[in-house]
Image (cartoon, rainbow, N blue to C red):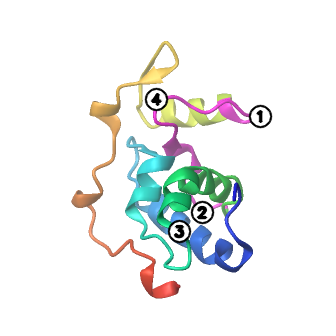
Amino acid sequence: MRYIPDEFQQQFYRQVWSCARQVPIAKVATYGHIAQMLERPLALKEQDYKEFSARWVGDAMAACPNDVPWQRIINAQGKVSKRVDAQKQKVLLEQEGIVFIDDKLNMSQYQWDENSTAGDLTQASLF
């Protein structure tokens, strides 16, 4: 179950993108953090969701529309994940004022606190 089942994919992606749009300038969220913010679709086993949801968020970010600040979603180590546009992501974050030390940022300084942003981020009603 590496990939999100087709019947949930677009709805899940839209919820991921909605969350990512709320991450403010000069803040970041991790793939896993975004996944935890979204409720597990009831049709999926809890273990499958826990195991694969961060990857599904990554898949959603790879397919995001232009209005999603994709650069603000990073891996749990506080690093930009290795991929073709990794350097571009780092540059965009640095332009927002985020400082990297040895290719890692200080999560305690830059981690987005979703509780400081109003809005309902759940997806339960979609499934």
Q: Nearer the viewer, mark 4 or mark 2?
A: 4
The segment highlighted magenta reads: 66-86
Identify the mark at residue 77; answer none if there is no mark: 4
- Where is residue 122 shown, x and y percent of the image? 39, 74
Q: Which residue is mark 2?
A: 67
Picture layout, residue 55 above or below residue 47? above
Q: Which residue is drawn at the image coordinates 40% and 47% (left, top)?
A: 25
Q: Which residue is mark 3?
A: 45
Comparing 15 with 25, the one in front is 15
Question: Which badge, 1 or 3, is on the more N-terminal residue?
Answer: 3
Q: Which residue is mark 1?
A: 84
Q: Which residue is drawn at the image coordinates 47% and 64% (left, top)?
A: 46
Question: Which badge, 1 or 2, is on the more N-terminal residue?
Answer: 2
| Tag 3 secondary structure | loop
Q: CA distance from mark 1 to mark 4?
A: 19 Å
Picture layout, residue 10 above or below residue 56? below
Residue 81 falls within the magenta-colored stretch: yes
Comparing 99 with 13, the one in front is 13
Q: Nearer the viewer, mark 2 or mark 3?
A: 3
Q: Which residue is drawn at the image coordinates 38% and 71% (left, top)?
A: 121
